[in-house]
Amino acid sequence: DAGITQSPRHKVTETGTPVTLRCHQTENHRYMYWYRQDPGHGLRLIHYSYGVKDTDKGEVSDGYSVSRSKTEDFLLTLESATSSQTSVYFCAISSQGRENYGYTFGSGTRLTVV
Amino acid sequence: SQQGEEDPQALSIQEGENATMNCSYKTSINNLQWYRQNSGRGLVHLILIRSNEREKHSGRLRVTLDTSKKSSSLLITASRAADTASYFCATSFNAGGTSYGKLTFGQGTILTVHP
């Protein structure tokens, strides 16, 4: 998707290993979000950021951490991957945080923990 | 949970027919949005309706919002095979303070349009 890229697109990792997913934007948007998508659960918010070094937890943050050292990059780290973290992870960006005007989503990262 | 719920879970129609999907939510909102997701892709924003609006149109899309019933509907008129996708509603909740634009998504409706 224009202006936002996620890497890697696919990853297989072993239980107990740390994994970092990257979201990069070229839109200079202030707000960035990480969601996971699972069958039967829709999209659930993991963490979000409202500025450089400003982050907070979402609905399903256990086992995840994030960092945002510059506007364009938002990293999601699975500290010790578990099979329950097998999912599709989406990053989204928004220019308006107080009243959301719509997200732009990345193409997703399909993560498999074996 | 503040998560919205969509109905039906799956909808199968013929090309040219109208498709209607419904979304219900539980708490007061700032706005409600609809997104489309094609298989294996990210979500794409379709339309946003604010809490003080009752109806909104965009091309073949018509969205209604009934805040008294905490529900919304998305109507796609004259459906095409290319409309085949999953459709999600998402709500921006009015928490009385800064929400940071967080959205809560429903589980989606899978729409299949047969040529």
Image: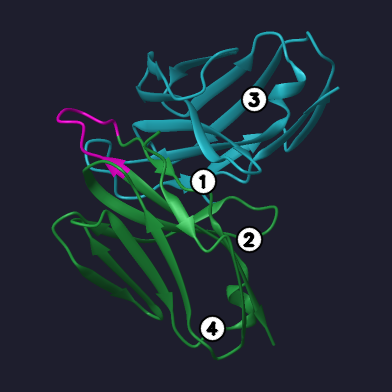
Q: Where is residue B105 in the image (x, y as percent from the top left)?
A: 45, 44
Q: Label 3, on which residue?
A: A21
- Colour scheme: by chain
Q: Is residue B99 magenta?
A: yes
Q: Label 4, on which residue?
A: B79
Mark 2 touches mark 3? (CB < 8 Å): no
Stretch of the chain drawn in magenta: B92-100
Query: Which chain can be seen in green?
Result: B
The dot on residue A105 is 1
Quadrant in the picture for residue B28: top left
Magenta span: chief secondary structure: loop
At 51% from the left and 23% from the top, the residue drawn is A60
Q: Are marks 4 and 3 on the same chain?
A: no
Distance between the Cα atoms at labels 1 and 2?
12 Å
Going from N to C along the chain, the mark reached first, 2 or 4, is 2
Chain bearing mark 3: A
Q: Where is residue A24 in the image (x, y as percent from the top left)?
A: 54, 33
Chain bearing mark 1: A
Q: Label 2, on which residue?
A: B38
Q: Is residue B102 magenta?
A: no
